[in-house]
Structure formats: C-alpha cells, structure tokens
Image (cartoon, helix red, strand yellow):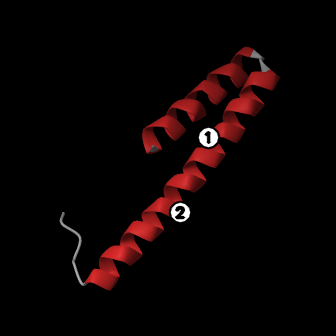
Amino acid sequence: MLGWALTFLIVAMVAGILGFGGIAGAATGIAKVIFLIFIVLLVISLLANALRGKTPKL
C-alpha cells in the first residue's frame, strides 16, 4: 500500500513539472488518502501485536 502511495506521489510530481495541474492535484489527493489508510492500518497492527504480547520481528 505504501508503494501505491509513492507511485501516485511520483505521478503527481511528474504531472506538476509538465504543467498538468489537474492531474497533479488528483494524484496528490489519492496519494494522501492511501498514505493515511496505510498509517491507520499500521497503528492498528502495532496495537494488536502489543495487546497480544508479541514483539515485532525485525
């Protein structure tokens, strides 16, 4: 999921450089939403593992 967010961010930057403002804005918005979903799922996962008593494996 983080990969998708980074992909949309790169698309937004390239579109912004080339002057496609509408596409850049849309891609930026999509990247923000996907990144926020990623952060929420990460926090839920970390809390679930903490409540189970498991330590993260590195």
Residue 9 locus on image (x, y percent): 59, 35
Which circle, 2 or 1, is nearer the viewer? Answer: 2
Q: Residue at x 18, y 66 (%)?
A: 57
The residue closer to the viewer here, 4 or 21, is 4
Q: Residue at x 78, y 17 (%)?
A: 19
Q: Is residue 7 left or right of residue 46?
A: right
Q: Residue at x 64, y 46 (%)?
A: 32
| Disc 2 + disc 1, Cβ < 8 Å | no
Residue 16 locus on image (x, y percent): 72, 24
Residue furthest top in the image: 18
Write down the quadrant of residue 50 in the picture.
bottom left
Residue 46 locus on image (x, y percent): 37, 72
Q: CA distance from mark 2 to mark 1?
A: 14 Å
Write down the quadrant of residue 55 in the picture.
bottom left
The residue closer to the viewer here, 16 or 1, is 1
Q: Is residue 34 above or below residue 54?
A: above
Q: Which mark is residue 31?
A: 1
Looking at the rendered image, the quarter that the C terminus falls into is bottom left
- Give the amino acid type for the residue marked by disc 2 in the picture: Val
Judging by the rendered image, the residue that carries numbered circle 2 is 40
